[in-house]
Image (cartoon, coloured by chain):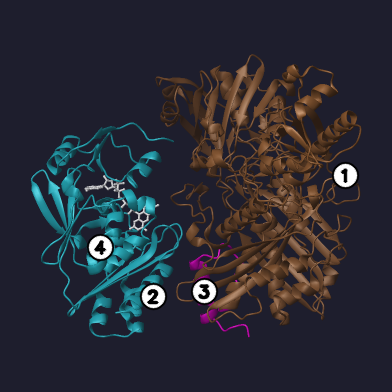
């Protein structure tokens, strides 16, 4: 079936977008690349009366490497722009590599980082890496802006802390120290990953995040402790498989997903 | 007498290529008729049940809705017989009593726009009294409920059997009992989707009592005959036109939505277009999932003495081509070996799922998955290289594929060797990798059938070739133009193929079973030869001697370099003034080719030829994740003669790529009878990234030993047959696990590896 009918709005600023959402609360959705939203609408799984197209909101399209080495990535920045960004390639090559393998080039050309995070589809690659990097979400609401660590952003599959009248404006990545290392591992048997895992080591802190196997990305704190203590591959594998909380889906079962996370954790830590 | 080489055997550009790559080619879905309305279907969400009520009031009240149609309308509409199918007419236009699968159409809305029809369709309320659904073949055979209570089970092995076939020779039980070694295993093959890029589409219009239908079908004359029977018309009142079809793979054989669209147009009193979504095509037809239990016995020298096969095919809710698929499964299960004692039983079992029908390979991939895996395992058990084992045991040319059928017409060992060479068989695979191969054979060309073709040479030296072949992307029409060009010695670009229109096209049985190039091609060649003869005779009459010539644009160019304008020659021959060129009309021939019928052949018609596909694979297995990567794959198709080597190789390559699907990941997943992944977001199809890392090789074996024009055999199905068993053997060689269930997805391989390491090994 084709798309059901809807009204299209094209705000030019974040404030206008928030106002529109507020006005049509419950019946409006932000529309960026539409790679998720339009699919849902075509299948009759979502029927928003109002689509708020924020692609002309300049602020959402800003991608900045700030003087302190921290990044500010507008929610409207497409995967393709991240994939091709030369500074990103130099300073955060893992992120660029992630983007190179995400979906396919048609999705990357129009799909946005904000759309990926806000949709909270459990098989997100950027969510996993960004949480490991300690990123923060900036959210605009009718009462102003608020900041939420990305680690606390996801509530459940397809659910985030964003309210129906809020807009994700950008993602902030803190600077990485010289000697830190970042690894992102991904296994995919179809477009979206079957499992992914990020490992970020900065000085003495180790962050390991597992994704795509549960309802949302999960910090593997036990595995982090083992990594910090210099544990061997077997120990990392054991810790990761013990604490990860996968959920079964139509094609993959829990024990297999658990195993995959163990393998990825072992590989990520070993490669640093 | 012409020799080949003028256009045959050349990679001549396809006549449809430019229109297709520039988006100008017309498909059914592109066509709009005046006053045309649009239909949308209401599909059952229940897998099995009795319809108690269909409330159409809300939908009917929507502005722009023309009418809503349910099964109850059929009698009123004067439908003479609402059922269709092939040998079993069990599928109703719209059911008014039972729903038999989740996704079955139970009502339709006709509206001014597709949008309105789609919206209104969501307002139709269908009430169903549930009946316990039969979701697996085992359940169905036990028969707690019957999918078609009005029909008797076709076999004594259980309930819900739609069709049952057995082929046997010798004494299989005794031979197995006396065998030196008996290999026994159960092999499973998943139900998979055709996924043709163009979903099913049909446009129907009544002109008084005459019917005009435009449909993306592979079988226009079958559709014509069904419509005439069902709506009480003479066949000459029904016209079926087939524009370009965006892929078929067997999923557009027989009638699909044509009878329904015609009924809708009747009630709407307007032309109606029904264009499905891809999701709906997933819920229309599929490939049979199967369970094959096979025992193969060998003597002390490794000779195969007996094979006993039992094939259970999940045919879904309606028979469609299921009975034929079962028959061929039984017929092909023995495989291309000389086996004195065999018994092959195959049955199509009704379940409450999406119907299964014809699909590229037509049950050969299912039985070859079992048969060739068994051969690989037997060779391994005997400690013989699987290539060597096949060299010793494959049928020789002239051997019996089945008793009293056409003798094997191919060099099987020679073909398999080409495949083996493609993966450098003699060079051992590095650690973590393995190689495997397999040989698949199907009887080709289908059952009894007539193929006709008409060739017209027009007075300006251009030509037309008319057939009933649907151009489904396979390139048959390109080949027809080449055949005509070869015989008329003209430029193939000056020959135009005409798409099927039952009102004007010569008859054809249908575009299936790799029969078009061979059977229709023979008719085309005969017609073209006749036109060439007529032309030659005319030249002889006018010049007093028989001369060789070629046609260059509007001229005949003779062997001595002189030339003459064709129209002038024709005018002279007919005593017409040259100024009346337009009166000349064409030089025409209509020819036909009938398949042989033989009382002795087990199938009634001897096999037209054997369609042979060899495959050899090299894979890499990641033991930690179970992921299997295809490193190299070579497909060898024995095509007799590649009339167009480029399109021929592309057909075989396409078939092999399609096989990557069921080998590695494709599978229709059901939960309580509901198809969970019947959409392109969730159904995993082969992608460019799935192609073998070091390349996909396609070799065409051309021994000019086929019954088609210039020694051609059919092509296009062979490549899909052998990949799964070749890959499974390669996986075994790489990591030591045997897997009997497809697809070989990472989770399944990982599980098999797990079991192998936690349990004591066999050796
Ligand atoms: C075939 C396919 C393969 C994919 N593979 C991968 C993969 O391998 N890895 C991976 O990580 N992802 C994958 N994805 C997901 C992909 O990254 C997302 O589809 C894309 O990034 C979504 O962005 P969009 O702009 O198209 O979102 P849209 O579809 O426009 O929006 C998605 C949702 O987010 C909301 N939204 C969007 N922006 C905002 C905002 N700024 N504030 C508040 N709400 C907002 C919308 O209202 C909507 O509900 C895949 C998707 C597809 C279709």
Give the numbered dot on residue A86. Answer: 4
Q: Which of marks 4 and 3 is in front?
A: 4
Cα–Cα gap, marks 4 and 3: 35 Å
Report the residue marked by disc 3. B621
Q: Nearer the viewer, mark 2 or mark 3?
A: 3
Report the residue marked by disc 2. A263
The subunit letter for the residue under badge 4 reads A
Cα–Cα gap, marks 1 and 4: 71 Å
Up/down of B337 relative to B163, above or below = below
* Magenta stretch: includes residue B555: no
Q: Can residue B461 be seen in this view?
A: yes
Q: Residues within 10 Å of mark 1 (few under 14, many from 20)?
A: some
Residue A245 percent across, percent down from the top left: 33, 67
Instruction: Find the magenta span and give its range.
Output: B735-763
| Colour of chain A as rendered | cyan
Report the residue marked by disc 1. B597
């Amino acid at each position: 079936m084709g798309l059901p009918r809807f009204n299209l709005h094209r705000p030019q600023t974040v404030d206008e977008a928030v106002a529109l959402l507020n006005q049509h609360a419950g019946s409006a959705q932000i529309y960026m690349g539409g790679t998720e939203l339009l699919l849902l609408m075509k299948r009759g799984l979502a029927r928003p009366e109002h689509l708020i197209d924020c692609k002309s909101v300049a602020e959402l399209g800003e991608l900045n490497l700030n003087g302190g080495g921290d990044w500010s990535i507008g929610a409207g920045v497409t995967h393709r722009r991240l994939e091709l960004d030369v500074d990103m390639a130099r300073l955060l090559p893992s992120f660029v590599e992630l983007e190179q393998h995400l979906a396919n080039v048609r999705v990357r050309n129009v799909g946005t980082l904000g759309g990926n995070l806000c949709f909270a589809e459990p098989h997100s690659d950027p969510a996993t890496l960004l949480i490991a990097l300690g990123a923060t979400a900036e959210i605009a609401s009718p009462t102003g802006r608020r900041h939420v660590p990305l680690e606390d952003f996801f509530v459940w599959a397809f659910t985030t802390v964003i309210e129906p009248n809020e807009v994700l404006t950008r993602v902030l990545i803190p600077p990485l120290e010289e000697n830190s290392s970042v690894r992102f591992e991904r296994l995919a048997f179809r477009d979206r990953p079957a499992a992914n895992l990020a490992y970020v080591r900065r000085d003495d802190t180790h962050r390991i995040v597992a994704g795509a196997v549960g309802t949302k990305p999960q910090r593997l704190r036990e595995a982090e402790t083992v990594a910090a203590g210099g544990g061997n591959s077997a120990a990392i594998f054991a810790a990761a498989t013990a604490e990860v909380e996968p959920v079964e889906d139509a094609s993959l079962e829990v024990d297999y997903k658990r195993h995959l996370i163990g393998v990825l954790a072992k590989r990520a830590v070993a490669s640093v | 007498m012409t020799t080949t080489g003028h256009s045959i055997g050349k990679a001549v550009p396809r006549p449809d290529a430019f229109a297709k790559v520039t988006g100008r080619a017309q498909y059914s879905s592109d066509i709009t008729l005046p006053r045309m309305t649009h239909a949308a279907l209401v599909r059952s969400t229940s897998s099995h049940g009795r319809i108690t009520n269909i409330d159409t009031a809300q939908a009917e009240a929507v502005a722009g809705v023309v009418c809503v149609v349910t099964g109850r309308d059929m009698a009123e509409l004067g439908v003479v017989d609402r059922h269709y199918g092939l040998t079993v007419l069990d599928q109703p236009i719209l059911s008014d009593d039972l729903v038999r699968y989740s996704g079955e159409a139970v009502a339709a809305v006709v509206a001014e726009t597709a949008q309105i029809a789609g919206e209104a369709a969501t307002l139709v309320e269908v009430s169903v009294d549930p009946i316990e659904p039969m979701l697996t073949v085992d359940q169905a055979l036990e028969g707690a409920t019957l999918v078609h209570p009005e029909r008797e089970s076709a076999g004594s092995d259980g309930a819900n059997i739609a069709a049952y076939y057995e082929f046997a020779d010798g004494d299989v039980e005794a031979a197995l009992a006396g065998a030196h070694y008996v290999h026994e295993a159960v092999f499973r093959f998943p139900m998979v989707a055709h996924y043709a890029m163009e979903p099913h589409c049909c446009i129907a219009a009544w002109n008084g009592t005459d019917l005009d239908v435009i449909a993306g079908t592979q079988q226009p004359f079958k559709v014509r005959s069904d419509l005439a029977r069902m709506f009480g018309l003479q066949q000459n009142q029904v016209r079926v036109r087939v524009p370009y079809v965006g892929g078929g793979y067997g999923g557009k054989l027989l009638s699909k939505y044509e009878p329904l669209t015609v009924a809708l147009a009747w009630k709407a009193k307007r032309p109606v277009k029904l264009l499905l979504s891809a999701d709906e095509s997933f819920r229309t037809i599929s490939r049979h999932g199967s369970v094959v239990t096979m025992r193969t016995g060998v003597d002390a020298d490794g000779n195969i003495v007996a094979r006993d096969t039992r094939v259970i095919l999940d045919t879904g809710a309606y028979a469609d081509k299921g009975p034929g698929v079962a028959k061929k499964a039984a017929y092909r299960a023995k495989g291309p070996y000389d086996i004195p004692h065999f018994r092959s039983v195959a049955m199509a079992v009704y379940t409450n799922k999406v119907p299964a029908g014809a699909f590229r390979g037509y049950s050969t991939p299912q039985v070859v998955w079992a048969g060739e895996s068994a051969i690989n395992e037997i060779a391994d058990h005997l400690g013989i290289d699987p290539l060597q084992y096949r060299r010793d045991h494959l049928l020789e040319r002239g051997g019996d594929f089945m008793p009293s059928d056409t003798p094997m017409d191919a060099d099987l060992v020679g073909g398999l060797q080409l495949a083996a060479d493609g993966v450098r068989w003699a060079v051992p695979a590095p650690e973590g990798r393995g190689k495997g191969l397999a040989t698949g054979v199907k009887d080709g060309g289908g059952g009894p059938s007539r193929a006709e073709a008409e060739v017209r040479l027009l007075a300006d030296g251009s030509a037309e070739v008319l057939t009933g072949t649907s151009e489904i992307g396979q390139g048959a029409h390109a080949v027809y133009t080449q055949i005509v060009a070869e015989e008329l010695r003209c430029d193939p670009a000056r020959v135009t193929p005409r798409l099927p229109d039952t009102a004007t096209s010569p008859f054809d049985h249908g575009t299936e079973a790799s029969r078009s190039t061979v059977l229709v091609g023979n008719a085309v060649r005969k017609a073209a030869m006749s036109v060439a003869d007529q032309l030659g005779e005319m030249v002889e009459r006018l010049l007093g001697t028989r001369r060789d010539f070629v046609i260059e644009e509007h001229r005949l160019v003779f062997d001595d370099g002189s030339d003459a304008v064709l129209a002038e020659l024709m005018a002279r021959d007919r005593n017409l003034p040259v100024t009346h060129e337009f009166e000349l009309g064409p030089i025409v021939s209509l020819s036909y080719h009938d398949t042989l019928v033989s009382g002795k052949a087990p199938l009634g018609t001897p096999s037209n030829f054997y369609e042979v596909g060899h495959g050899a694979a090299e894979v890499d297995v990641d033991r930690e994740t179970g992921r299997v990567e295809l490193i190299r794959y070579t497909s060898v198709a024995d095509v007799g003669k590649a009339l167009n080597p480029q399109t021929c190789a592309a057909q075989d390559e396409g078939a092999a790529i399609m096989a990557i699907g069921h080998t590695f990941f494709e599978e229709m997943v059901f939960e309580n009878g509901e198809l969970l992944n019947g959409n392109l977001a969730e159904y995993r199809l082969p992608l460019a990234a799935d192609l073998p890392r070091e390349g996909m090789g396609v070799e065409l074996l051309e021994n000019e030993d086929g019954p088609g024009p210039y020694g051609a055999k059919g092509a296009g199905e062979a490549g899909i047959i052998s990949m799964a068993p070749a890959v499974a053997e390669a996986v075994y060689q790489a990591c030591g696990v045997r897997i009997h269930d497809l697809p070989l997805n990472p989770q399944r391989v990982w599980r098999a590896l797990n079991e192998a390491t936690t349990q004591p090994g066999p050796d």
